[in-house]
Amino acid sequence: MSTTADVRVAGAAEAATAGPPRKRAAGKRQLKRGERPRSVSLLIHGALITASFIAAFPIGWIAWISLGPDKTDFLHPGDIADKISFENYTTVLNDTSFIQWFVNSLIVALGTCLLGVFIAASSGYAVSRMRFPGHRQLMWTFLVTQMFPVAILMVPLYNILANLGLLDTYWALILVYCTTAIPYCAWLLKGYFDTIPAEIDEAGRIDGLTPFGTFYRLILPLARPGIAVAAFYTFLTAWAEVAYASVFMLSDDKYTLAVGLKTFISEHDTQWDLMAATSVLIAIPASLFFYLVQRHLVTGLTAGAAKS
């Protein structure tokens, strides 16, 4: 009997001794590799939510102001909820030259996109694959052109376009915007072409393709994500630019959307409600263009992650 009692006492003592360490081990669970503590995750998510709110607030504010029927509603935004109206959009579409501004901007933006991407892709591919005299200096020259502010380039570009007879034409803006977008896009695409194996070019030459045929039929399809980024950048460069368009477009029927916004500002009055509605309408095509190219961007990112 005493032996059985001793065994029970020893078992109880062992269980009592082993209990607390198990609880401590469960309370302090060891984190797996790559796993964050809960407090760090909360801080990161809180920072991301705050940043997203800061980024989206101006857009939401302009959209809300555009629903106010009076031009002074931006002073009392809380009163808009009782009188929400789409009258501003109707006025902009029917009583202004918005459609003409839209067509002009679309011509300039698409022209800049097509010409800019073609030149940037060609130059980026040439520097990536070919070794010719001055190929390094060419890329550095692209960077040098980005060092000068718009105010310095305005006068010489105006004189050049005037001598060529291109003032007040779509080509004036397309060429000027290309000088802004091509340097960045050339560097971007050159880096993307560097990631494509050179054996593909050799296979194209063995099959009898010319260098341009290899570039067009083999390399460009593989560089589609990079092309999408370059196209989006060149499109936005031309779509939202104001300074050059204000100086080089002299006729009212050649105004772009960004310049058309200035017509709502006079010496004694500013039509904030119409400006807000026009701003929302201007943002819609840019958002649609991003929606069209983002699929290629995501595809490119996931493909790169899988290869790595």
Image (cartoon, rainbow, N blue to C red):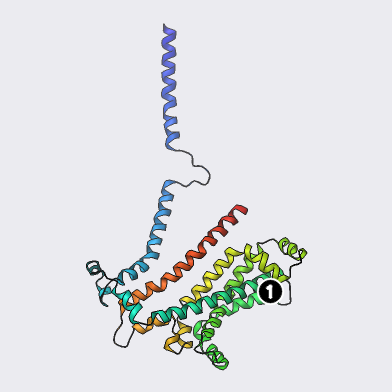
Answer left or right for 72 relative to 287. left
- Rendered residue at 54%/84% (across/down): 171
Q: Given the current orientation, which residue lies at the most extreme top position?
A: 1
Residue 275 visible, this angle: yes
Q: Is residue 308 above or below residue 112?
A: above
* For residue 239, side relative to residue 87 (left or right): right
Q: Which of 208 and 145 is in front in this view?
A: 208
* Amino acid residing under circle 1: Arg
Residue under the point 41% across and 53% down: 43
- Which quarter of the rendered picture does the N terminus lie within? top left
Residue 308 seen: no
**Disc 1 packing (10 Å; few <14; some 14–19; many ≥20):** few
Q: Where is residue 188 in the image (x, y as percent from the top left)?
A: 59, 68
Q: Height in image: 113 above or below 6?
A: below
Return the residue found at the far bottom.
Answer: 163
Is label 1 in a helix, a strand or a loop? helix
Residue shown at the point (41%, 48%) measured from the top left? 39
Q: Residue 140 location in percent, x, y?
A: 64, 75
Q: Viewer-proximal residue, 251 or 145?
A: 251
Residue located 41% across and 11% down the image: 5
Residue 28 percent across, percent down from the top left:
44, 38
Left or right: 148 as drawn, with respect to 220: left
Residue 78's quadrant in the figure? bottom left
- Locate residue 300: give its quadrant: bottom right
**Looking at the rendering, which quadrant does residue 213 occupy?**
bottom right
Which of 3 and 27 lies nearest the eye of the viewer?
A: 27
Q: Name the residue under label 1.
A: 136
